[in-house]
Amino acid sequence: MTQVRKLWPLLTAIQNYDKSISTYQVGRGQVIEAPILAYLLETANGRILYDVGCDHQKINQAQLSKQYFNPEQFPCGAPLMTEEHRIPHHLARLGLMPSDVDVIFVGHLHWDHAGGLKELRRCGCGAEIHLQHDEWAHAQTDPSVFPDDLVDDQGQPLQFKLHRGEYEVVPGVQAVATPGHTAGHMSMWIELPKGPPVLLAGDAADLQENLDHEIAPGGLWQENEAMAIDSIRKLKALAARTGAQLWPNHDIAFYKRLQVFPLAYE
């Protein structure tokens, strides 16, 4: 029996970028608008965050923004991330504090998914941080990982609880291995108490187009397109087998069809 009570999608930033970043060798030269999402789960055994968005300081402090979002790597500039997008702000709207989060599940370590770790620690969040061993092992060679995101304000490395392969986070929440975008990318299957299950693709599928046409995401670990497509097919098969809704991660049209925060899925 599932321990999940509620699920909230959290909009943590908006970014414009070349579509080929989301669709491998497709859409080059077309700029798209994309949401950067995290997800909050309330369970009978505590609260879980899937991903934590960006580092607000890196985006909004001029010197840091110039350093981390240089035009060569980010021709469309840094994402838009306001005070309202910060995860502590979302939590406050629900009457919660960062210290009320018990587990942070990091699907992968790219800057737009793990950048908020330091701020949450700064705000008193002592949550256990789950991560795949393979993700940690290859993070140092991934240019989309900002090493500074993985340390606290004193420069001490954040402590991760490293896992190998798939596992049950709590009853009703399953970690699903979907490598390809990164070495240790993880999706999440969530059994809701009333509606159909939700399967969070994470960056295994940025857009609905990735799912519909089985197109790999633009960023690939070791250029392994076949591995990424296998993960997409795995997600689609799991969704079909369990009746789950399969949610892409950076699709603005899909995001606009979701319930408006602070409404929750139950």
Image (tube, grey):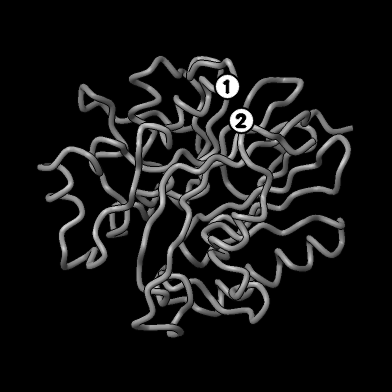
Residue at 72 percent of width and 59 percent of height: 246
Q: Residues within 10 Å of mark 1 (few under 14, many from 20)?
A: some
Tell me the element at label 2. Answer: strand
Describe residue 3's horizontal placement relative to residue 129 as left or right: right
Q: Nearer the viewer, residue 240 or 259?
A: 259
Instruction: Name the amino acid, label 1.
Output: Asp
Residue at 12 percent of width and 50 percent of height: 66
Residue on which the image places disc 1: 102
Q: CA distance from mark 1 to mark 2?
A: 6 Å
Residue at 55 percent of width and 40 percent of height: 10
User: Considering the image in quadrants, where does the C terminus appear?
Assistant: top right
Tell me the element at label 1. Answer: loop
Whether 259 is drawn above or below 29: the answer is above
Whether 27 is drawn above or below 191: the answer is below
Describe residue 165's horizontal placement relative to residue 45 as left or right: left
Labels 1 and 2 touching (C-beta < 8 A): yes
Residue 260 at what x, y percent from top left?
A: 63, 41
Residue on which the image places disc 2: 48
Number of labels in the image equals 2
Instruction: Name the amino acid, label 2.
Output: Ile
Describe residue 262's horizontal placement relative to residue 43 as left or right: left
Residue 264 at what x, y percent from top left?
A: 71, 35
Q: Nearer the viewer, residue 52 or 11?
A: 11
